[in-house]
Amino acid sequence: MTREISTPRDEDELALMEIRLERLRSIYDRWIRWNYQRILRSAQSELNALDHVPDEREVAGILAHYDSRQRAVLSQAYREIFPLAGDMVAPSGRKSVRVQRKAEEELDPKLEEWLLMHLGTRITDIDTVTLHRVQQLLMTSPDLPTFRKGLVKIFSDTPYRATVIARTETTTASNTAMQITASEHSFGRPVTKTWETRMTATVRDSHRKMQGVTIPMEEPFHVPRKDGGYDLMMYPGDYSMGASAENTVNCRCWCTYSYAD
């Protein structure tokens, strides 16, 4: 017999959990978006200030200058989201532990390990998108004016890109927190997780197929891809096993968890 401790017991509770989660995500969406607009615009300004058309290595070096800023922004977001999202799946009576941990600004060891192993990959992916765009520009830039004009076009979607990064990262951060918290409070009991979507018209087809899929917590979901294959994901937004952008970018899904007696 499985007794649902953290998983909402009815549609009303599930809807309430979705509202709480979206409110939390929206706060950090705005904060990450603001910071990433500054980061992307700073990179644009540094590239635009060059007195020559750079080569690919120089461009990569300039973008790498902002990796520490990216890491600081994302790390802070994960640290602050972790206790708040974790409380949504922690069994009754455990919330005070999370609040105390946040008050003391302590980082959960499992989250710290996750950040060390995977955050650099995310930053590299973000840099790669920008680098690829500039590489294409370099191939068609015979002179400096052409290069500078092309930069304006490349970075014209900075607000949109910052929004996509923010939405993607808050989903990954909150769902990572939930998974780690559920694991911490299993105490050897079997735990299952259920993929939940927002049940709106904007939910991608591959995730719509995942709605309600329930598996053991320690196993990965098999999420369909357009090419007929699938991505292995421990939870929505998880890219630790190489999940494709089509299944991670702009996702707003989450998991609910059930602890066995």
Image: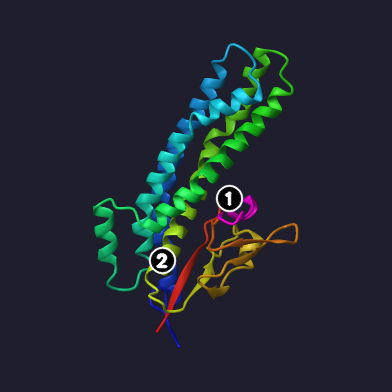
N-terminal of the two: label 2 or label 1?
Answer: 2
Q: Quick one: quadrant of the N terminus? A: bottom left
| Residue 19 placement (x, y as % from top left) | 41, 61
Q: Amino acid at mark 2?
A: Met
* The stretch drawn in magenta includes residue 242: yes
Q: Which mark is residue 145?
A: none
Secondary structure type for disc 2: helix
Horizontal arrangement in the rendering, residue 130 relative to residue 85 (left or right): right
State which quadrant residue 99 falls in: bottom left
Part of the protein shown in magenta: 239-248
Q: Nearer the viewer, mark 2 or mark 1?
A: 1
Up/down of 41 relative to 253, above or below: above
Residue of label 2: 17
Up/down of 80 relative to 211, above or below: above
* The stretch drawn in magenta includes residue 150: no
Point 62% across, 29% down: residue:
154
Asked whether 180 or 10 is in front, the reply is 180
CA distance separating discs 2 and 1:
22 Å
Point 43% across, 44% down: residue:
74
